[in-house]
Amino acid sequence: MFRNARKCDGGRRRCICEKQDSETILKHIDLRNVSHIGAYAFQECTSLETVIMSNVSVIEKGAFEFCRSLKSVTFGEVTDIGDSAFSYCAMLDIPEIPRSLTSIGSGAFSHTAIQRADFHWFGEIPRYLFGCCTSLVYADISGAVSIGEGAFSECRSMSFVRFGDLEKIGAKAFYRCVSLEPASLPETLTEIGDDAFDTVRPGIVVPGSVRYVGRNCFGPVDKRKSIKIYQSTLYGFRNYFREDRKGTEEDEEHFYLWESSIDVSVLDDMTGTETGFLPLYSDLYPAMRSALLDAFSPDNTFDYSVLDTVFVSEMRWNMKGKDRLAISRLMHPYELSDLTRMEYCDYIRRHSKRIARWAIWTGAVDNLAFLFDNDLAEDVNITELIDYSISVSASECTAFLLEKQSESMCYSGSIPDEL
């Protein structure tokens, strides 16, 4: 088939290898004498399993789109692959991408079974290139300076990406990549798009080179996270909390997830020491969001009084959110007045049992230690806490509480000589 052809053409949504009036449906195609495959040439050839095209240099858009049974493709010195060329080839794995490839379109390999993607010579990763490739576990894009929108979105098995001198991460580039948890970001990075990641390693440092931080770029609002940013990027970070929903009807139906949060440590540009700590939330009432955005100043400072007034007032019914805010403000007392400090301490003492149990439940041993070390848990029954800690398998908290219990049982006086 196609023995004397040099180009295979196809019309949109037309399969040239399946004929309704034929008893035979082709599963294997030899295109060794073809150099150019036209747009949509084999689109929806749902029985096609293998293709040999060792002399093909150009594969136009949609050429093998929706070939759901396609398992094996033999490339030669291919140079161009168009948009969605192999999209929805759900069984297709390509062990090695040809190094001859110089141009590739958006979504070219989306919804395929590719497991490893080595594109280290590409300077730009197109939009949705590997979108929904749920078998993809590894990607080398060390030559890329930019990653397009949704390039790896919903690649749920991907656990490692090799970056190089990357400058731009597009919106939703790693959206819902639930197995990917970056521990660091390239020092050359300047832009992180909206919803870029699903999650990041706790305490990840945002490089000082970053000038644009997208909305919820470090994961959805229902996942707690902690990051570190430099003082010079503080004002730009306000974009992380900008409003993205529109319409009063949506506002009325929306449920605000105040238990979700992001802890932001602000670092000095020169020394890297902490100069601020913001216990913030990604999902807020419009009035709270407006006050929060106004708290960020163009001179890269933050008005902490917003946390101690607007946030405290609006969190009357959200006890867990208020508990966390009180602990965080006392542990990191930036611009905290003496009066407000006393109010937070009184609040924690009144609710110390609940706060201690929540610290154990979340494994926040630092919060638990702060309560005991600062006499904020005077009325807490430590034996009950130990039993609770053991029941929820909070080993670090249990060890700390046992140590505290041991200290409290020691005799304060001197030991008698006869003992």
Image (cartoon, grey):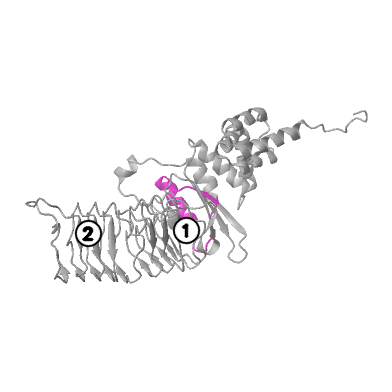
Residue type at mark 2 is Phe
The residue labelled by disc 2 is 64
Q: Residue at x 59, y 62 (%)?
A: 268
Q: Position of residue 400 (x, y in %)?
A: 67, 38
Q: Residue at x 53, y 45 (%)?
A: 309
Q: Position of residue 6 (x, y in %)?
A: 16, 72
**Range drawn in magenta:** 278-304
Question: Does dot 2 land on a helix, a strand or a loop?
Answer: loop
Instruction: Say which of 157 and 401 sits in front.
Output: 157
> Based on the displayed image, in which of its 4 quarters is residue 399 positioned?
top right
Residue type at mark 1 is Phe
Q: Residue at x 22, y 59 (%)?
A: 64
Query: Is residue 376 visible to us here?
Result: no
Determine whether, in the image, residue 315 is placed left or right of residue 52: right
Residue 279 highlighted magenta (yes or no): yes
Tell me the tag on residue 237: 1
Q: Residue furthest right?
A: 417
Q: Position of residue 204 (x, y in %)?
A: 53, 56
Task: Give the answer, above or below, for where 96 lies relative to 201.
Answer: below
Question: Does dot 1 land on a helix, a strand or a loop?
Answer: helix
Q: Residue furthest left?
A: 21
